[in-house]
Image: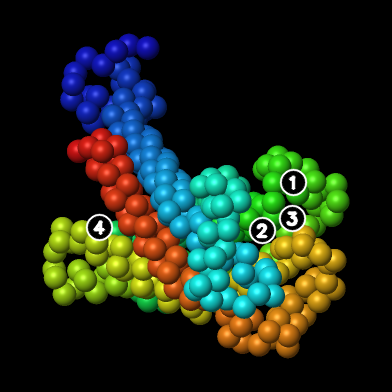
Amino acid sequence: MVKAQKKESLLHGDVEQHGQITQGEWYLRSHRRRVYDDLGNEDENIRKEFKEVISSLSAGAVAGAVAKTTIAPLDRTKIIFQTSNEPFSVKGAVGVLQKTYLENGFLGLFRGNSATMARIIPYASLQFTAHEQFKILLRTDGNRKGPLPPVRRFLAGSLAGITAASFTYPLDMIRARLAITQKNKYTGLANIVVKIYKEEGFPAYYRGLIPTLIGIIPYAGISFFTYESLKKLYFDVMHDAKKLNPLHRLFFGACAGLLGQSVTYPLEIIRRRMQTNGISGPAKPEYRRMWSTAKYVYKTEGVRKGIYKGLTMNWVKGPVAVGVSFTTFDLLHGFFQKRFIEIESE
């Protein structure tokens, strides 16, 4: 093929092909830069989105681990009361903590925390990451930043909770078993996984899943909705996002945890009874179904001492855990955004 003699012919495409350049060659040459630029931008967007997901996963994992470790002794004490017929009281809770410390030492207060970490790290990672992605999917204005409308704000939180709970539920059941048993029953995480499968079968890992999913919809929805709404209210009043410090985030997260757990607490009682049925005595047939469990607990223990048993302790540990979790995630996620994503895009 004879090469183009004049620049003019190339620029105008020489569509008549007067022996200088073919139309196909002209198209490739004249459009190559734009095509490569588009491909480059697409690759850049994919890399940026990938880094955003990784930053959400990492920040969520650390947030969940820090929050749950902070309140692990209180969480273990709460589960002991939830799964027993002993009435809850602050004095009784302190007694359980003292007894645990005297019999098993300081580390005994954190028994079951390894299973908690095995569950909470993937759970928190999935929940926070799913929440960020659902916020993007539920937008209609094309913007990636800023608060969602109220209904979609609630929906994003609920969907994130369902996603995380569905994938990590067996680890929650294992954590509850480890929290209420002594070392001679289950020696560790691997031992309990094998033992449950051999003695009770695979379905035992998902015992109590239905009340969990029913409870996670309002709990996660209310928690994320309250936290995001309080932040939006603060920004609207103060008109300066920089004034939102960690103490503000802790307070907003505490309010979110307090409200969310108060509304959905009865379902947690039902879930714990189903998860631990048969551990400290003969299995009760009433604890095999969600509605029969609720009916039995209400009939034998009432509302305050049964359905809402241990709620007082939840009002202490719940706001602390949720506040620490949201605050840690926001700070780490913001750090990762500035350090690894925004700098690259400049």
* Circle 3: residue type: Tyr
N-terminal of the two: label 2 or label 4?
2
Q: Residue furthest top?
A: 2
Identify the coloring. rainbow
Sequence-wise, the earlier of marks 3 and 1 is 1
Residue 256 in picture, x, y percent from top left: 39, 71
Judging by the rendered image, the residue that carries numbered circle 4 is: 246
Asked which secondary structure carries label 1, the reply is: loop
Q: Position of residue 92 (x, y in %)?
A: 55, 71
For label 4, the SS is helix
N-terminal of the pair, mark 3 or mark 2, is 2
> Which quadrant, please, contains the N terminus?
top left
Read off the residue under disc 1: 184
Callout 1–callout 2 Cβ contact below 8 Å: no
Amino acid of disc 2:
Ile
Above or below: residue 55 compared with residue 94: above
Residue at image position (46%, 57%) is: 71
- Per the rendering, the mark at residue 205 is 3
Closer to the eye: label 3 or 1:
1
Q: In the shown orientation, is residue 12 left or right of residue 285?
A: left
Left or right of 38: which side holds 342? Answer: left
From the image, state whether disc 3 or disc 2 is nearer to you: 2
Q: Residues within 10 Å of mark 1 (few under 14, many from 20)?
A: few
